[in-house]
Image (tube, rainbow, N blue to C red):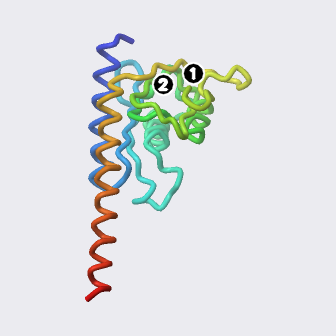
Amino acid sequence: MSIAEDIKWMRHALMLADNAQAQGEVPVGAVLIQNGKIVGEGWNQSITLHDPSAHAEMMAIRNAGKTIKNYRLINTTLYVTLEPCSMCAGLLVHSRVERVVFGASDLKTGAGGSIMNLLDDERLNHQIEVTSGVLAEECGAVLSDFFRMRRAEKKRIKRQEKLTREH
């Protein structure tokens, strides 16, 4: 894959992250590519679906499995705006994804090299090629802006509750 291809598909993942944000979810998007074509897409839906496993990667992988009618996703590349967590990294290994490209690193739960690297752990039966930092600033800004807005909204609600109690 070329850098231009990686950027193209990461931009698509960023567009999917907008779907998550529109639903009040943490804005993470993921797209799975096979032979230059989209076979699966997803975005965070844990809150909406009441499902802690409904991460963008999980949704994209589930979608791809149905699309190609196989639980093995051979010769695929996943583009995701945030480094996968350990749950998603395990899923990607079991799915036999060939390559993962992510934007922003996750210094708290990242399992693609930040705090651990399950994607390329030789003790496992499958290793995944990892490319990190594609559109990292843009991907990180989307997340930072979301959490900044969420903190401001929580402060506003607390202030409003305080004013209501005082009157």
Q: Residue at x 33, y 56 (%)?
A: 150
Q: Which mark is on residue 100?
A: 2
Up the image or down, 59 lies above or below 71; here it is below
Q: Position of residue 141 (x, y in %)?
A: 30, 37
Q: Position of residue 138 (x, y in %)?
A: 29, 31
Earlier sequence position, callout 2 versus callout 1: 2
Q: Amino acid at mark 1?
A: Ile
Q: Nearer the viewer, residue 111 or 99?
A: 111
Q: Is residue 48 left or right of residue 23?
A: right
Q: Residue at x 46, y 19 (%)?
A: 131
Q: Amino acid at mark 2?
A: Val
Up the image or down, 97 lies above or below 144; here it is above
Q: Secondary structure at mark 2?
A: strand
Up the image or down, 25 lies above or below 86; here it is below
Q: Residue most toward the top? A: 2
Q: Are marks 2 and 1 in contact (CB under 8 Å)?
A: yes
Q: Secondary structure at mark 1?
A: loop
Q: Position of residue 25 (x, y in %)?
A: 36, 53
Q: Residue most toward the bottom? A: 167
